[in-house]
Image (cartoon, rainbow, N blue to C red):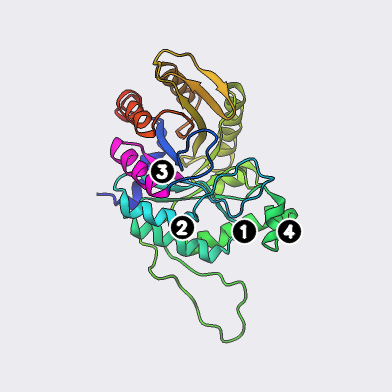
């Protein structure tokens, strides 16, 4: 029988179906303060309700100039708590800023969360998009494409089945390093955003490509571009395509879908139609960024009873 580590990626990303996840934290509109004890309870509830993945962002710093003022916990701290308080859902970083963290620290965090969660961790990696943060960390934003590739290679080597540590410097007589605990199995690595790389590079190196929601015609074009890249660069392998979508779920089941920034306000009936269309267009996973005045548990319960079975039950 395949281990959890072996099949966690296929439980989230399958060529034959669409799965649904939840992004944390879940906040009411215009709120930038999260009670993270409450977030753990929301995560436990979503896990028990059948959401296939729980997504955690990496936001190193905040600034009054940023459009997103939400205070996020360090992702490794939150992922550790989620590993201890959930049982089924994949835990996905969406995304660790690969260019602003040392890749060996990232590998150590990934191995740690994978062990704590029983192999339920998928390492989503991004490059960050805020030049001022690069300066704060002593990095040159113009070098982010090269940094992303270099750091990806170091992380991938440390997480490989036959793992090896690639040191920044190896002076004469330096010992050979390794990670403990050793990776029990391959930790899947997912590209979140492009990281400044070509889609062909992503198709060669990542299990899939996760993007923001876009209007249907635009997203279909992006998926077609992605499929062409997979055919060129990884023709014998399945490579997933997913999207993060803002969702304002109306209490009125038959309310039609209205576009909002990065998603929709909609009732559940139109939501099902939207998700079915996304699956038919080639999307394998959608994670919801909930934005609603309704209590989070009410929204999760409605999705769990009326929406998830239509996609996870077949």
Label 2 Cα neighbours within 10 Å, binned few <14 / some 14-19 / many ≥20: some
> Magenta segment: does it hold 186?
no
Residue matched to label 2 = 76
Residue matched to label 4 = 140
Whichever of labels 4 and 3 marks the residue nearer the N terminus, that label is 3
Whichever of labels 2 and 3 marks the residue nearer the N terminus, that label is 3
Whichever of labels 1 and 3 marks the residue nearer the N terminus, that label is 3
Residue matched to label 3 = 54
Query: Measuring 42% from the left and 33% from the top, which residue is drawn there?
Result: 15
Query: Measuring 39% from the left and 31% from the top, which residue is drawn there?
Result: 295
Image spot of residue 229 (x, y percent): 59, 38
Q: Residue furthest left?
A: 1
Whichever of labels 1 and 4 marks the residue nearer the N terminus, that label is 1
Residue matched to label 1 = 100
Whichever of labels 1 and 2 marks the residue nearer the N terminus, that label is 2
Label 1 Cα neighbours within 10 Å, binned few <14 / some 14-19 / many ≥20: many
Q: Is residue 166 above or below residue 126?
A: below
């Amino acid at each position: 029988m395949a281990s959890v580590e072996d099949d966690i990626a296929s439980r989230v990303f399958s060529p034959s179906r669409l799965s649904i996840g939840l992004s944390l934290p879940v906040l009411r509109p215009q709120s930038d303060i999260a009670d993270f004890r409450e977030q753990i309870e929301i995560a436990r509830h979503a896990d028990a309700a059948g959401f296939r993945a729980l997504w955690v962002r990496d936001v190193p710093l905040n600034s009054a100039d940023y459009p997103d003022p939400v205070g996020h916990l360090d992702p490794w701290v939150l992922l550790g708590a989620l590993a201890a308080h959930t049982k089924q859902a994949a835990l996905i970083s969406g995304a660790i800023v690969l260019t602003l963290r040392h890749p060996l620290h990232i590998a150590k965090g990934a191995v740690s969360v994978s062990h704590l969660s029983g192999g339920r961790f998928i390492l989503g990696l991004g490059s960050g998009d805020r030049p001022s943060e690069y300066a704060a960390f002593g990095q040159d934003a113009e070098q982010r494409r090269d940094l992303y590739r270099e750091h990806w290679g170091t992380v991938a080597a440390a997480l490989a089945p036959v793992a090896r540590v690639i040191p920044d410097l190896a002076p004469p007589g330096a010992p050979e390093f390794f990670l403990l605990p050793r990776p029990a199995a391959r930790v899947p690595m997912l590209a979140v955003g492009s990281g400044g790389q070509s889609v062909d590079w992503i198709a060669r190196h990542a299990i899939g490509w996760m993007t923001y929601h876009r209007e249907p015609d635009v997203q279909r074009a992006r998926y077609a571009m992605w499929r062409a890249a997979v055919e060129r660069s990884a023709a014998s392998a399945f490579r997933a395509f997913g999207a993060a979508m803002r969702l304002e779920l109306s209490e009125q089941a038959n309310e039609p879908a209205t576009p909002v920034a990065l998603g929709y306000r909609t009732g559940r009936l139109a939501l099902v139609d939207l998700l079915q269309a996304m699956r038919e267009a080639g999307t394998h996973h959608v994670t919801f960024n909930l934005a609603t005045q309704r209590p989070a548990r009410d929204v999760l319960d409605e999705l769990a009873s009326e929406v998830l079975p239509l996609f996870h039950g077949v």
